[in-house]
Amino acid sequence: MESTQKKSGDSRVNRGDRIKQIFAFVSMVSFGGSAIFGIVSLFGSGLSSQHQQKPTAVAVSQESLLAAQERGYVTVLQREPQNQTALEGLANVRLEMKNRKGAIEPLEKLVKLNPDRADYKQLLGQVKGKK
C-alpha cells in the first residue's frame, strides 16, 4: 500500500514538474518572440528615419561649415588685412554662400594687390555684373 501511495505521489510530483517545464518553455518562446519583434521594428523605424533626416543634416552642416570658414578668414584679415590667401578664401566662401555682394570687397583688394592677375579681374567683373 505504501508503494502505491508513493507511486501516486511521485506521479503527481512529475506531473507538476512537467506542467512547470511546459509553462517555462511557453514563457521563454513568448518573451523571445516579443523581443525579436521589438528589435526588428526598432531597427526598421531607425533606418527609415535616418534616411529622412540625412539631407537636412547635410545641408545644415554645409551652411555652418561655410559660415565657420568665413568667420575664420575674417579673423585672419582683422590681424593681417593684406593676407592674400585669406582674401581669396573669403571671396570663394562668400561666392559658395551665394553672397556676391560680400565677395566684391575681398576681390577688389586682391585686384589692387595683384594688378597683373587677370583671373582676379575677370572674377570681379563677373561678380559685379551679376549683382
Image (tube, rainbow, N blue to C red):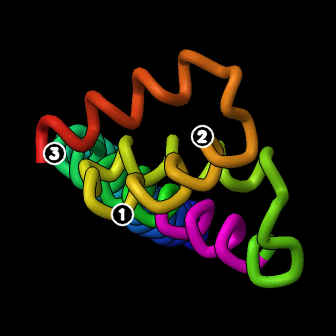
Label 3 environment density (alpha carbons within 10 Å; few <14, some 14–19, many ≥20): few
Query: Bounds of the magenta span?
Result: 67-75
Q: Nearer the viewer, mark 3 or mark 1?
A: 1
The residue carrying mark 2 is 111
The residue carrying mark 1 is 102
The residue carrying mark 3 is 52
Q: Earlier in the sequence, mark 2 or mark 3?
A: 3
Q: Is residue 15 visible?
A: no
Magenta stretch, main secondary structure, is helix
Q: Is residue 122 visible?
A: yes
Mark 1: which amino acid? Gly
Q: Position of residue 96 (x, y in %)?
A: 37, 42
Along the viewing direction, whichever of 69 and 18 lies nearer the viewer: 69
Residue 38 location, quadrant: bottom left
Q: Earlier in the sequence, mark 3 or mark 1?
A: 3
Label 1 environment density (alpha carbons within 10 Å; few <14, some 14–19, many ≥20): some
Residue 82 location, quadrant: bottom right
Q: In whole angstroms, how far apart are the C-alphas of marks 3 and 1?
A: 34 Å
Along the viewing direction, whichever of 53 and 106 lies nearer the viewer: 106
Mark 3: which amino acid? Gln
At 33% across and 52% down in the image, what residue appears?
A: 97
At 45% across and 65% down in the image, what residue appears?
A: 64
